[in-house]
Image (cartoon, coloured by chain):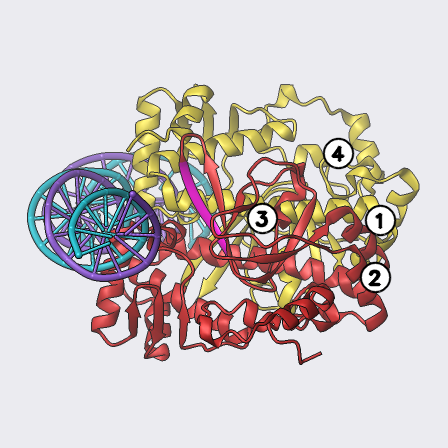
Chain colours: A yellow, B red, C purple, D cyan
Amino acid sequence: MLSRCPSAIMWHMPYIKEDSMPDTAAGRRRSLLQETRCQTCSLSSLCLPLALELEDMDQFDAIIRRRAPLKKGESLFRQGSPFTSVYAVRSGSLKQVTTGGSGDDQLTNFYLPSELVGLDGIDEETYPGSVVALETTTVCEIPFDRLDALSAKLPELRTQLYRSMSKEMRDDRRMMRLLSRKTADQRLATFFTSLSDRFRRRGYSAYSFRLSMPRADIGNYLGLAVETVSRILGRFQQQGLVAVSGREVHILDLDALIEVAEEEGCR
Amino acid sequence: MLSRCPSAIMWHMPYIKEDSMPDTAAGRRRSLLQETRCQTCSLSSLCLPLALELEDMDQFDAIIRRRAPLKKGESLFRQGSPFTSVYAVRSGSLKQVTTGGSGDDQLTNFYLPSELVGLDGIDEETYPGSVVALETTTVCEIPFDRLDALSAKLPELRTQLYRSMSKEMRDDRRMMRLLSRKTADQRLATFFTSLSDRFRRRGYSAYSFRLSMPRADIGNYLGLAVETVSRILGRFQQQGLVAVSGREVHILDLDALIEVAEEEGCR
DNA sequence: GGCCGGCGTTGCGCTGGATCAAGCGCGGCG
DNA sequence: CGCCGCGCTTGATCCAGCGCAACGCCGGCC
C-alpha cells in the first residue's frame, strides 16, 4: 500500500505544478517508511497532535489506525451508522452530506487535509451525515474512546480537541451568516477566498488550485442553484477576478474578491 | 430540597405571571444559600454535570461562579472580548449575535436554561459573538481553564462536555440546512416545533409559551424579513395551526406544524 | 473512431420574499 | 389623560435567483 510514491504532501496537493514540488526521491523513500507516523507527517503542524511532545506523540500514534485509501465517491461512513471514530484527513478531500426525509441532501462541509471529520457524531452516537470522498483520499482513523481516554492524560491533546470542535462551531456560524445574509455573488466570493486561505495555510498556492468538487456540490453547499454558480463564475471571470476552466481555478485579484465577499453596503 | 420556592424551575419559566410567583423574602434567602449548588438545581438532569456522582459534583460546584442576574438587554459578554469562561443558563434566555463589518448583525443562537454558552470561543481565545439577555436571566459562570482541568479527572464531565459541543455542531448543521433549503413557512414551522420541543424537555408545556424575543430577532435568526415573519404567523393562525397574540403562543396543531416543517415535496 | 452520459453553460420566464411605506395598538411617561 | 415611540401588521411593488429547457464539451467505453 505504501509503495505509491507521492508523499503525503504530494497526495493532497490540490493542484501541483511538477516543478514547484520540493520533494525528491529521498524524501519519498522516507515517507514510504514513516508515513504512518505523526512525527513525520507533513501535516503535524496543523493536525490534532500539533502541540504534543515527542513521547506523547508516540502514545497518540499508537491509537490511530490506518485505512485503505478511499476512491472518489466512496464513503468514509454513512449517515446513521454508529459513531466509533473520528478521522483526520491525510490527503485528498471529502464532503459531508446530510440527507433528510425524502432525498433532499444538504452538503454541510468540505474537509481538507489535517481537518477532523466526525466530531458531530459524539453526541447521540451515530453520525449525523455521510462523508464521501471527492477524490482519492487517505485518512487516519482515531477511535474515539481511546482518544477520549488519552485526552485525559495529555492536556495539550485535550485542548487541541476542544479547539477543533470550537473552531468547527465558529465556522458553522460563519456559514449560517453566509446563508442567511449574503447574496449569491458574496457567497461565491467567500467560497473562493476561504478555499484560497485554507490552501495557503497548508502551504499551497493561494492563487491557483483545483476544485475537487463538481458545481452541483458547490451550489448545494452555498445554498444556490447550479445555474447560479455557473453564471456568477462567468461574471467573475468577465470582471477579471478569476480565471476558471473546468475545475482549474486561478485567482487573479484576491483583494477584489475579498471586497466582494465582504461588501455590506449593498443594501 | 424541593421546598425552596422560587425553585429554579420557576425562575426560568419563559413567562411568569407576578401573582403566580410564590417567592418571598424567606424563599429568597434560602435560595441564596442553596441555589448555587448543582445538586439542588432543578436543571441538573439536563445540564453539564448531568452524569456526575455526588462527590464529583461537589468538585464541579466548587469551580462555578455566580453572577448577578442580567437584565433584559444586558450582555453576558461582548464579541471580541477575551474568552475566559463558559456559562450555563439557569433561568431566562439569551441570544448570540455576531456583528460583521458594518452594522450587519447575524443572530446565531438562542439559549434556554441548562444550555451552555460560549463554547465557540475556546478556539482563538475571544468570543466570536456577543451574548445578550432577552429577559432577566441568571447564569452559572464556569471558568474554562478550571473546567478543562477538572475534565481531565472526571471522565463523565469530559464526555458531557464533548457531547455538548457535538450537539451544538449538529444543531448548527440543521440550521444550515434550514437556511439553505427551507421556505419561509418551513422555517417558521421548524422554529416553533423546535421551541416547543425544547420547552417540553425542560418540563414546560409544549403547547403554550411566551416568546422572549421580538419578531425582528426571529426574522434575523431565520434569515427572513420581519414582515415575512409577521405575514406567515398570520397565515398559520388563519389555518388554525397556532394562536398567537403578541409574544404569547399557543400551538393548536403540533402535528400539522411538524408536517409543514418537514414537507420536502414542495418542489 | 464514434457513441454516450455526465457535467457545465446559457437563455428565459416566473415567483418567493425583500423592500418600501403606511397604519395600528399598546405601554410608558410627562 | 393624551402624547410619543416602539413593535407589529398589512398592502403594494420589485427583483435576485430558481426552475426548466436546450445545448455544448469532454472523457470513457465499446
Q: Tell me, yes or no, whether the two marked residues, 1 and 4, touch with CB atoms within 8 Å.
A: no
Q: Which residue carries the number 2 mark?
A: B59
Q: Which amino acid does label 4 sit on?
A: Ser
Q: Tag 3, which secondary structure?
A: helix
Q: How far apart are marks 4 and 3 (CA)?
A: 21 Å
**For the residues marked 1 and 4, what is the alpha-carbon distance in whole angstroms?**
15 Å
Q: Nearer the viewer, residue B198 or A159?
A: B198
Q: Is residue B109 magenta?
A: yes
Residue at 23% x, 65% y is B234
Q: In this view, does B254 lie to the left or right of B64?
A: left
Element at label 2: helix
What residue sits 28% from the left and 33% below the top?
A: A267
- Identify the disc placed on residue A45: 4
Quick check: B188 left or right of B157? left
Q: Is the N terminus of chain B in the top left, top right, bottom left or bottom right quadrant? A: bottom right
Identify the residue position indicated by label 3 in the image.
Answer: A169
Picture quadrant where residue A218 is located: top left
For marks 4 and 3, the one nearer the N-term is 4
- Give the CA separation, mark 2 to mark 1: 29 Å
Identify the residue shown where x is 48% and y is 72%.
B197
Answer yes or no: is residue A118 visible.
no
Residue B101 sits in quarter: top left
